Image (cartoon, rainbow, N blue to C red):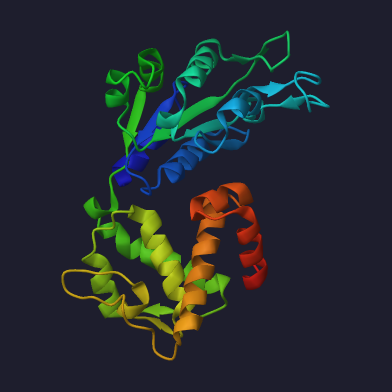
Amino acid sequence: MEKVLSTASLFAKADAPVLITGESGTGKEVVARYIHEESGRKGRFVPVNCTSIPENLFESELFGYEKGAFSGATKSKPGLIEEADGGTLFLDEIGDLPLALQAKLLRFLQEREVRRVGGLEAKKVDVKVVAATNRKLEELVKEGKFREDLFYRLNVLRIEVPPLRERKEDILELVGYFIDRFSRRYDKKISLSPEALDVLLSYDFPGNVRELENLLHRAVLVADAEVRPEHLGIKTEKSTFSCFLPPGKKLPEYIEDIEKAILINALEEANFVQTKAAKILGIDEKSLRYKRKKYGI
């Protein structure tokens, strides 16, 4: 990761786009934010999840629109690119962007200007573009699902973020950070037992850093003073703890603790956009509102 961050710092000073690749949950957005900080740009860091914006709204969200451009456009609105002027535009999950929208994005990257929907004039913008994907863009290009010209436009400066199983030395740092973070959130004093650390170090984390974060979030929530293996709810070749209740916990109470932690994780991942969080959880918004009220979230 030191090499990744060193490369990111170097790329931050360049004008060309940066493409960050790696499995889901490896921390690609963290690297993107680091690039923004290292760039010295005074503008905002504007994240755009290419999968969360409906295709029919993507152009108006990205480029903005003028008053009267379509039904409901009662006033002009700048797009996300304009909001990132002087800063960094982070295009997350770029590999899932529909082909029709890829052409519009390519035109922006070539011209470095935006024209709002319904507008007549183009506006020049100074934006550093950072894109990320967990998909293999080269394969998508061969399959005709990703434009070759857009791929080469983005693939100028590339950073590969390794999965957590290839950087086990980071686990100790991350564990300390997450336990401290969630202990503060719930006003608790929680430590990690040596046995629980052994479980974490022997686990491959298919969900990478995000999975580690979720595991420790739940563990801190349900533990009284020390995180033990049974609080983690994961299986390793050495042990199986997921079928045991934490000491002093009854099943209904434990289930509620886990559900609350899952809801908080989904809301944080969705930046507290309720529609997106409900989609992540696989429930409707009405159910999510009820559960938020129930747990006081």
Residue extending farthest to the top is: 120
Residue extending farthest to the left is: 237
Residue 74 as seen in the image, left or right of residue 31 = right
Q: Which residue is drawn at the image coordinates 81% and 21% (left, top)?
A: 67
Which percent across, then down, holds residue 46? 59, 36
Which percent across, then down, holds residue 221? 49, 75
Residue 294 as seen in the image, left or right of residue 278 = right
Q: Quadrant location of the C terminus?
A: bottom right
The answer to which image quadrant residue 267 occupies is: bottom right
Residue 112 as seen in the image, left or right of residue 192 = right
The answer to which image quadrant residue 23 occupies is: top left
Front residue of 162/297: it is: 297
Residue extending farthest to the bottom is: 248
Is residue 175 shown to the viewer in this render? yes
Front residue of 279/14: it is: 279
Residue 278 versus residue 102 in the image, above or below: below
Q: Which residue is drawn at the image coordinates 66% and 60% (left, top)?
A: 289
Which percent across, then down, holds residue 128? 52, 26
Residue 29 versus residue 265 in the image, above or below: above
Front residue of 294/82: it is: 294
